[in-house]
Image (cartoon, helix red, strand yellow):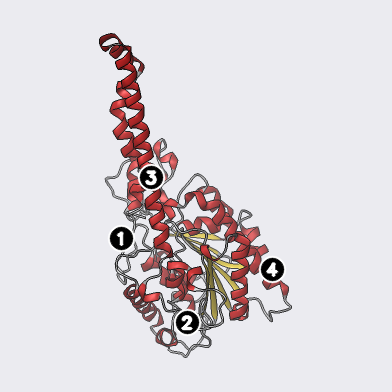
């Protein structure tokens, strides 16, 4: 996102270039030139100013289009370390899959090539896995319509036996198709492999450049959830219904929430057991969406705020850092003081004590902060800004009902210290993935 941000603002150089001419070709300026140099000079000046303005705007647009095209090409280009399709039949693009690597793109290849192994599961739990994890991914380029992409995803879920697993995690990816593997790693380890996960892409550009695709992304996610619910209700093919878990991060969180306009009623209708939404971007509908899930929701900033015992009614979890500018940014910052900058109130974690609200200025400051909210080093997990990697092990475990803070877990017999080993392995898995990514490539 950071590399893309300047091109979103590509019109600013055009405006800056044209401003001097706008001053010259104002009505007063033209009249002055006409008096001193004659009407021909005035006409030439107006024409020159208009030409420069038009040229600057056209040039900026062309530059932006070329950069957007380059970003799309990059999202289609698979990293050198992931060009070899997975060898497992339980993973899309693996043996028996109808989808080729080109249908999943860069982010899909990373996601599918990162499934946890038997060794990972045994390291965390101390037990041999009961099954090989299933991962399904359908990229934006896999088909020309939402309906066909969803059909491909359901076909892959059927082929791999996903509906026969104990748990099915549905992830809403970010704009490029990026699907965070860390929460999936948690589920794969703590279900001892008896799980499946699925993600369907809706674009190829970073989230910051995909805001115009939120409606398309919402329809994609809603169609996927409906199709999964229909499959689970069928009963003719499936001996039981898996637990349905939802995960969305950043733009993916917003998309998944919008796909559930009925709030708790939609969770019931679609058979969703739990949802974890991380770093939901702010906006005019932010408060309204949160209220939809209030009766069954909890919002926390970090794992230390997890309740000691998890009430079964808590089905929706919002993980949002107090100091995450992506969460805090909204249009009314320009003219209204937010509650998190109340001078007499307590500051949340990560919000500078010296920060004060100023009309317009705070809006611009938080906008710029969103660009630099995530500065990550693989394996060096931080709980700050828009980086939630250090929180996901403990929070996903609790939110998805896979274990509690005092140990134990959903499956008896795990060897002591599994929580510590889980955190260690999550970091190792991320470093392992990063080592396979070609230098200079990025996700988000």
- The reply to whether the C-beta atoms of the residues labelled 2 and 4 are less than 8 Å apart is no
> Is the residue 342 above or below the residue 378 in the image?
above
Mark 4 → mark 1, Cα distance in angstroms: 40 Å
Circle 4 — which element?
helix
Q: Quadrant of the N terminus?
A: bottom left
- The reply to whether the C-beta atoms of the residues labelled 4 and 1 are less than 8 Å apart is no
* Label 2, residues with CA under 10 Å away: few <14, some 14-19, many ≥20: some
**What label sits on residue 62 in the rendered view?**
3
- Sequence-first disc among 3 and 4: 3
Residue at the extreme right: 236
* Label 3, residues with CA under 10 Å away: few <14, some 14-19, many ≥20: few
Circle 3 — which element?
helix
Residue drawn at point x = 42 percent, y = 69 percent: 392
Residue drawn at point x = 71 percent, y = 71 percent: 233
**What label sits on residue 230 in the rendered view?**
4
Mark 1 → mark 2, Cα distance in angstroms: 34 Å
Which mark is in front, 3 or 1? 3
- Residue occupied by mark 1: 375
Circle 2 — which element?
loop
């Amino acid at each position: 996102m950071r590399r893309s941000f300047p091109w979103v603002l590509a019109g600013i150089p055009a405006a800056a270039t044209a401003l001097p001419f706008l001053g010259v070709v104002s009505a007063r300026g033209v009249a002055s030139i006409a008096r001193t140099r004659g009407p021909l000079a005035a006409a030439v000046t107006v024409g020159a100013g208009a030409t420069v303005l038009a040229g600057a705007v056209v040039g900026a647009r062309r530059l932006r289009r070329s950069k957007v095209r380059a970003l799309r090409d990059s999202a289609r280009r698979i990293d050198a370390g992931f060009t070899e399709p997975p060898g497992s039949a339980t993973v899309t693009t693996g043996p028996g899959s109808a989808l080729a690597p080109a249908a999943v793109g860069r982010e899909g290849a990373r996601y599918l090539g990162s499934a946890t192994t038997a060794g990972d599961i045994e390291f965390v739990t101390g037990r041999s896995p009961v099954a090989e994890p299933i991962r399904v991914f359908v990229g934006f380029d896999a088909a020309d319509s939402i309906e066909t992409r969803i059909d491909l995803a359901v076909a892959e879920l059927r082929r791999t036996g996903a509906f026969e697993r104990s748990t099915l995690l549905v992830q809403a990816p970010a704009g490029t198709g990026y699907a965070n593997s860390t929460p999936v790693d948690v589920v794969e380890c703590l279900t001892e492999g008896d799980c499946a996960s699925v993600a369907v892409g809706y674009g190829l550009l970073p989230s910051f450049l995909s805001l115009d695709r939120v409606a398309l992304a919402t329809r994609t996610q809603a169609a996927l959830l409906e199709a999964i619910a229909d499959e689970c209700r069928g009963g003719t093919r499936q001996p039981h219904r898996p637990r349905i878990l939802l995960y969305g991060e950043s733009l993916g969180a917003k998309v998944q929430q919008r796909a559930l306009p009925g709030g708790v009623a939609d969770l019931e209708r679609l058979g969703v057991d739990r949802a974890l939404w991380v770093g939901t971007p702010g906006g005019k509908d932010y408060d309204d969406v949160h209220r939809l899930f209030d009766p069954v929701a909890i919002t926390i900033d970090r794992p230390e705020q997890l309740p000691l015992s998890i009430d079964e009614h808590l089905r929706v979890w919002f993980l949002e850092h107090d100091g995450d500018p992506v969460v805090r940014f909204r249009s009314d910052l320009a003219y209204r003081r937010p509650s998190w900058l109340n001078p007499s109130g307590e500051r949340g974690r990560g919000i500078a004590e010296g920060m004060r609200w100023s009309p317009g200025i705070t809006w611009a400051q938080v906008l710029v902060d969103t660009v630099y909210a995530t500065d990550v080093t693989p394996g060096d997990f931080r709980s700050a800004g828009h980086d939630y990697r250090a929180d996901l092990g403990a929070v996903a475990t609790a939110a998805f009902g896979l274990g509690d803070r005092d140990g134990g877990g959903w499956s008896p017999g795990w060897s002591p210290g599994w929580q510590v080993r889980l955190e260690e392995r999550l970091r190792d898995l991320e470093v392992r993935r990063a080592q396979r990514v070609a230098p200079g490539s990025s996700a988000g």
